[in-house]
Amino acid sequence: MDGKGELLITIMSSLAQEESRSISENVTWGQRKRFADGKMIMPFSSFLGYERDDDGQPRIVEKEARVVRFIYKQFLEGKTPSYIARQLTDMGIPTPRKCSKWSISTVTSILKNEKYKGSALLKKTFTTDFLTKKKKLNEGEVPQYYVEDSHPAIVSKEVYELAQIEFEKRERSKNYKPTASCFSGKVFCGECGDIFGSKVWHSNTKYRRTVWQCNSKFKNKCSTQHFTEDMLKSAFVTVFNEMINNKDEVVMFIKTTIENLMDTIIIDKQISEQEQKCRAVAKNVEDYIYLNTCKVIDQEQYEKQFNKLAAICDRENSQLEKLKQELKRRLDNKREIEIYLNCLITQKEICNFDEEIFSSKITVYNNRLVFTFRDGTERECVQKNK
């Protein structure tokens, strides 16, 4: 370990580091080239629902695919990822990594992974340092590639898009709770506006039954009657079949609704005008800051004026964000109605209640039920309580 040895080690270390850099750059270039050509990479050993076929391409494993579809179905029926994770654990279904206990993050990643609809977003992460191999979420630092229909889909694109819309809805709702029934949170009192909840009557007798009743019936003295779950299901089957029998009329109404939602000229113009206001206010702030660097200004007066300009800037940016959120809400609503329309066109009459079809809001007016469907159409069913 004399001076010559240290010099030799330094030279060899430099050569090894440069070789590592060269290999890393070559591997990175190869990956980007494959991604640009639309060739995706899937971690089959830890990816639920797919396996590698003889050509190295993804192939659906039907046994695992049923689990994926079950997760999407439960989520769209109102269950939370934590509830679904407990269900899968209790059912003894292994995780993608063959563990016995499911986590919330695993369920969420399945619900948000575009590969299950047959598409692939490539280069989600990248290596920041070729020596430490540390990875980072790609937030635009390196190019990303999106490939549609790159492999067989386990769930339809419509189901996947509905799941993403549902995520956004729940994020906006601060007090979202998982639903035990498909009717939870969807039945409302037409008199006071409160939600109907399930109540167990005669719980310790042979006359035990579950009914749906206004949560504020005695507080607000509502006259709306209670309904059993079977009555709600029967009423839905009735109004749904009536709608199917008048399908042409309903489809025409839905298409008109979609056309109205597509007409975003006014809100697009408002967003454009608001963006101009935001740029003008931001420029005023920048000019005032620059003026302070070039001219002697009383700092107390400067702070007062600066805070005033900053407040105006925040207010205009907030208004712009509200307009963008409204545009997004309309586009999401349009997407939901389009999916609903596609399902309705191919739907036939039903004999029994189907949770997958039910997605309506029910308003109770005494013994009268009004069903409001996704497109806004309403159907009424008069049914006497028993």
Image: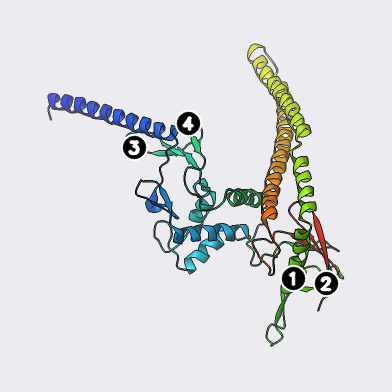
Q: Which residue is mark 4?
A: 143
Of pointers 4 and 1, the one earlier in the residue sequence: 4
What is the spatial separation of the Cα atoms under label 2 and label 1, in whole angstroms? 10 Å
Quick one: 112 or 8, which is closer to the camera? 112
* Residue 383: mark: 2
Of pointers 2 and 4, the one earlier in the residue sequence: 4
Q: Pointer 2 and pointer 1: residues touching (CB < 8 Å)?
A: yes
Give SS at disc 1: helix
Residue lying farthest to the top in this orientation: 294
- On the rendered structure, is 116 left or right of 296? left
Give SS at disc 4: loop
What is the spatial separation of the Cα atoms under label 4 and label 1, in whole angstroms? 53 Å
Q: Please name the amino acid that badge 3 sits on.
A: Thr
Quick one: 41 or 24, which is closer to the camera? 41
What is the spatial separation of the Cα atoms under label 2 and label 4, in whole angstroms? 59 Å
Residue 224 visible in rendering: yes
Specify the quadrant that holds the N terminus: top left
Give SS at disc 3: loop
Is 169 rendered above or below residue 275? below
Quick one: 56 or 273, which is closer to the camera? 56
Q: Which residue is mark 1?
A: 234
What is the spatial separation of the Cα atoms under label 3 and label 1, in whole angstroms? 63 Å
- On the rendered structure, is 227 left or right of 340? right
Residue 364, by quadrant, is: bottom right
Q: Please name the amino acid that badge 2 sits on.
A: Gln
